[in-house]
Image (cartoon, helix red, strand yellow):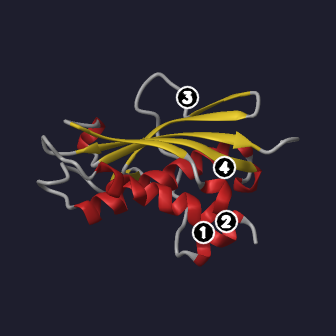
Amino acid sequence: MNIESKLKELGCTLPNPPAAGGNYLPTVRTGNLLYCAGTISSSNGAMTHTGQVGREQTVQSGYESARVCALATLTNIKQALGSLDAVGRIVYVGGYVNAISGFADSPAVINGASDLFVALFGEAGKHARAAVAVAGLPKNSTTEIQVIVEVKAGV
């Protein structure tokens, strides 16, 4: 089964490519690595989750926000590689959680992205990761992720 079929099986659809929020590219490939710019919790041009976890958002809604970020990142990966089946491995996820001071459950929030990658790619979806609470994110997004992907040989 290909990755896009797995997405549908999970009830997910890829959003339109997110607009860049500045002077940068959504992805940059060097060799067999694809570096993905940060994506916030936006889908088809509209914010889905805003505010801080521990104030306006819960750990569960933060988890959903991270999943939205992962879907936007997958859109950028597909744009860059032509197919999600070209992904050899999710190498790294840097996760940021807009949270109240002292918030200690960032890993549980960023699992929203990590769990989706593992559900889609299996063992190749398991990755190194950081999950960090911060005082604010662009557009008051609840989460943001950055991803590094290994591209399959020959792609």
Residue type at numbered disc 3: Leu
Is the Cβ of the residue at disc 3 closer than 8 Å to that at disc 2? no
Q: Helix, strand, or loop for circle 3?
A: loop
Q: Is residue 153 left or right of residue 53?
A: right
Identify the residue position indicated by label 3 in the image: 25
Judging depth in this view, the residue of 120 and 75 nearest the camera is 120
Question: Which circle's residue, 3 or 2, is located before the other in the chain?
Answer: 2
Identify the residue position indicated by label 2 in the image: 4
How much space separates mark 3 and mark 2, taking CA atoms? 24 Å
Residue at figure coordinates x 18%, y 49% from the top left = 52
Question: Which circle's residue, 1 or 4, is located before the other in the chain?
Answer: 1
Q: Is residue 116 left or right of residue 130?
A: right
Residue at figure coordinates x 57%, y 48% from the top left = 127
* 6, above or below 27, in the image: below
Relative image position of residue 93 (x, y in whole percent):
50, 43
Is the Cβ of the residue at disc 2 closer than 8 Å to that at disc 1? yes
Identify the residue position indicated by label 4 in the image: 78
Residue type at numbered disc 2: Glu
Residue at figure coordinates x 75%, y 34% from the top left = 32
How much space separates mark 3 and mark 1, taking CA atoms? 25 Å
